Image (tube, rainbow, N blue to C red):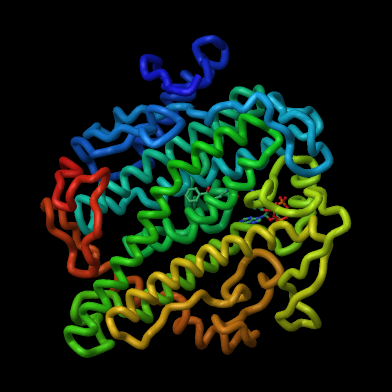
Amino acid sequence: MTRPDYAEKIPNNVGLAEDRRLQRALESWQPDFLSWWETMGPSLPAQDVYLRTAIDVRGEGWAQFGHVPMRDYRWGIFLADRDADRRIAFGQHKGEAAWQKVPGEYRAELQRLIVIQGDTEPASVEQQRNLGATAPSLYDLRNLFQVNVEEGRHLWAMVYLLHAYFGREGREEAEELLHRNSGSQDSPRILGAFNEETPDWLSFFMFTYFTDRDGKYQLGTLKESAFDPLSRTCEFMLKEEAHHMMVGTTGVDRVVERTAQVMIENDTDEVAALGVIPLPVIQKYLNFHYSVSLDLFGGETSTNVANYYTAGLKGRWLEERRRDDHLLRDDAIMVDALTDGQIGQTEVAALVGLNTDLRREYIADCSGGVKRWNRILADAGLPQRLYLPHQAFNRKVGAFAGIEASPAGEKLPADEWAARKGQWLPTDTDKTFVRSLMQPVYERGKIAAWVAPPRNGINGQPFDYDYVHL
Ligand code: BYC
């Protein structure tokens, strides 16, 4: 059951051919998906793209690369191998065999988690749909399209679970996943960050660094789930997700590198007129994408998350490496909170603080990016540094949703925030400036002036490879 079967209409390694009803249901969803892709997917027409397609779920050679027209990309259903002895690692069912079916008492919660996860995947494709028109190079264009097709596949991953395990309600939810749209007034996507715009490539790199990284952590916790098909699907999604974060990490690297180069060459910080993005603008974009991504972890305290954990639906990051009882009934955790109206911390039961636990793992990971970008600045001989803003900055969800705070973490009165927020978040002028730099470069081996070329190409190919035929 490891290798996907590409002879089928829906490539899969879940034995779809043996379940005619499920196969028919998914085959009837497939045209709706394709018509969503045509109307909401990448708007730049391309003849073919050098894409990777999964051919196995294990090992090094799990993907193959080749030029494919995007509409012929084979979206399929691939689950990591089943471990027949897998046991639940946490919560009240700890030690019991992992579930192959959905227990009736957890049906609603599991469905909700899968729908929320599923909703983000097409949302990101919608957010990124017009970026092809301004790609800085064919290499970047190819990466955008790779990310897009794989987010489409991640939607398939969740839709498979909804169809296979949640009956009529699951099928209805699968339809809804194609009807909600990013930024729509009437039927927006579920989570805040997925209704924001991704109008330029600096936003795209920040999104794939910060928001895709939330995906990494959320998928990591769902990979721990007692519901084995969810766990196995997330395990394989994480493999694909690693590339998306590479696009973000090296994308921001390359923006910082190019800006630093122009600053040094011209011995000035005022580089906007020289056609690159000034460091303060990069910092503002970072502030925005980081803070909206922090919101994706939910409230600092949450009874939802306590219930998910106790039931075995959603674990912690690297659950099995934690040295505790994996029940957490008697444990406590300090979480960020407003105490007497001030930004501080408070102690709560560990179970209700699990969103905070996960957010902290994420923050530690994000600081790795900032370190890397600062190394680029230091190596260039520049004294400026980028930083992660305080957790209370620009939050719309959780303990700090009702207050305003500076990136340094000082609570601010509303009028001071209104007067100063343009120093910390991208203003219309910043956005217009960044957009003005976004002129497409579709010539092989050429790149826009605001970003440095990558150190490595894709799959051992050089930067000047013909990654996309337009
Ligand atoms: N926006 O109890 P609370 C990815 C709601 S990204 C709007 O504190 P909980 C990807 C919440 O639903 C990963 N609403 O939250 C990345 C709740 O509503 P109800 C996506 C929000 O439930 C890039 C209420 O507020 N996957 O894969 O503990 C490209 C109280 O919330 C938001 C997942 O998120 C928000 N930001 O945690 C492509 C995993 N936050 O119950 C893909 C599945 C909270 O009052 N989801 N609310 O109606 C979950 O695990 C949890 O639902 C959440 C929230 C972490 C999202």
At x 79%, y 31%, the residue is 96
* Viewer can see residue 134: no
At x 68%, y 27%, the residue is 85
At x 56%, y 11%, the residue is 19
Could you tell me which quadrant the C terminus lies in? top left
Q: Is residue 282 toward the left or the right of residue 445 in the image?
A: right
Q: Is residue 439 toward the left or the right of residue 26 in the image?
A: left
Q: Position of residue 199 (x, y in %)?
A: 35, 60
Choose top left, top right, bottom left or bottom right for residue 297. bottom right
121 w.r.t. 442: above or below: above
* Viewer can see residue 57: yes
Q: How many marks?
A: 0
Q: Nearer the viewer, residue 233 or 33?
A: 233
Q: Is residue 191 toward the left or the right of residue 131 in the image?
A: right
Q: Position of residue 411 (x, y in %)?
A: 65, 85
381 w.r.t. 399: above or below: below
